[in-house]
Image (cartoon, rainbow, N blue to C red):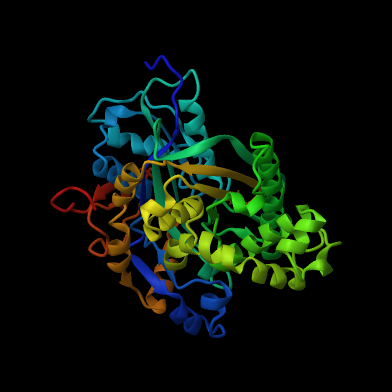
Amino acid sequence: MSSHWPENVGIRAIEVMFPSQYVDQTELEQFDGASAGKYTIGLGQAKMGFCSDREDVNSLCLTVVSRLLERHHIKHTEIGRLEVGTETIVDKSKSVKSVLMQLFATSGNTDIEGIDTTNACYGGTAALFNAINWLESSSWDGRYALAVCADIAVYAKGAARPTGGAGAIAMLIGPQAPLVLERGLRATHMEHAYDFYKPDLSSEYPTVDGKLSIQCYLSALDTCYRLYRHKFEKQHPKQSQLGLDNFDAILFHTPFCKLVQKSVGRLSFNDFLLSSEQTRAEKFAGLERFNDSTLESTYFDRDVEKAFLAQSAEVFESKTKKSLLLANQVGNMYTPSVYSGLVSLLISVPAAQLAGKRIGVFSYGSGLAASMYSIKVTKDASVFEKFVAKLDYVLPLLGAREKVVPEEFSALMEIREKNNHAAPYTPTGSISALFPGTYYLKDVDALHRRSYERTATISNGVH
């Protein structure tokens, strides 16, 4: 057991997995009879990954955890905590974490704390915070923690269906990490709201109040950002830069890409309202007409939105746009969403440019729970380059996916809907379409017990 307080606690490794099949959003527009550009321009989405009935939340987590341990040569006995954040529930009692314990059976390691955490898209962040807290507490026994988040986002036919997606992220948490969560710079906002929820336990589909959901997201963003700014300024009283200038990159939970662009504008609007008259004149010239505007009255104010979208365009381009790669190509992963943004940033910006920089993170889950915090990248460029090099599989894997026509996609969604919680059940989805080393659902027996198998791995065991 370690006798000293662990330093530089954060993310030592990160792994992402996404479905091997996708539907093109332009083709989906045509299939749905939607106006051209509604999904691609209006939502900012290009492709949407999806899972057939061969994959569920358990199989996604089995795959992503196995791949992380294999890729980074981590022994199963080196893990002391594992927590799963998800809102994709296949069992109201048995946790996904307990299913993952089969990966540790051969090693004999059953001494692993943590279970599942659920609140819409926020569970992954809760799992990450709990892992950090464990390492920085008297409970830590010197081993690593794993924070896992996975979901399958599916919607009924209609306007919401193109905002779906699926995926999983696993993060190895430990001391002396290349990505350190900054202590004391964590701001949280929680309240009761029915903006998006899943009251029908027999269905995968949510009940959504679209307008309220946007308002809740923006309101939580406002509150978390202002609280984060307050804590930052208290911790760094001599810092001359304020607000967005303190971030070298900013990541957001991404229900759809267009909302993120609006969110950058929203943070700029917050900076404007918090600025002195002199700063407004210098940084926000031409926006004086909004001097008396308030946050509460402008959630759907098109004039404010348009003005601050334009004002923050350069910030979005330089600090956020590159983080939307996976969101644009795969869709909304729910709990992994904001962390797919982290992966996207890491593979889209040269490692040397990010060394020593600060990354802002906004995580949101409907219902609602939200947090803003910051990650400090190590100054050691060579260490960070090695960390990022482990993500060299992401772009080739994106390119290796199979495009499925909307008609087939719709049919596969009907199969999922019809057989949700069916028992006994043998899935019919293609196994050959899955990537190497992917766990999949073999069958469900009459007692609803699920069994899994894995597709063949490639020669080096890493995918």
Q: Position of residue 29 (x, y in %)?
A: 50, 81
* Residue 178 drawn above or below residue 55: above
User: Residue 4 placed where, x, y %?
Assistant: 43, 17
Is 441 situated left or right of 300 in this image? Answer: left
The part of the image, by quadrant, that contains residue 13 is: top left
| Image quadrant containing the N terminus | top left
* Left or right for 372, reference 411: right
Residue at x-position 46% and y-position 76%: 25
Q: Nearer the viewer, residue 378 or 414?
A: 378
Question: Where 89 sits versus 284, above or below?
Answer: above
What residue sits 68% from the left and 40% below the top? 233
**Can I make out residue 113 in this image?**
yes
Residue 181: x, y in percent? 50, 38
In front of the other: 304 or 366: 304
In this orientation, does residue 56 appear?
A: no
Report the residue at 63% width, 46% height from top. 370
* Count of marks overlaid on the render: 0
Please identify the residue farthest to the left as the structure is shown: 459
Percent across and percent down for residue 196 are 64, 56
Task: Report whether 225 appears left or right of 333.
Answer: right
Give the residue drawn at x 32%, y 48%.
Answer: 385
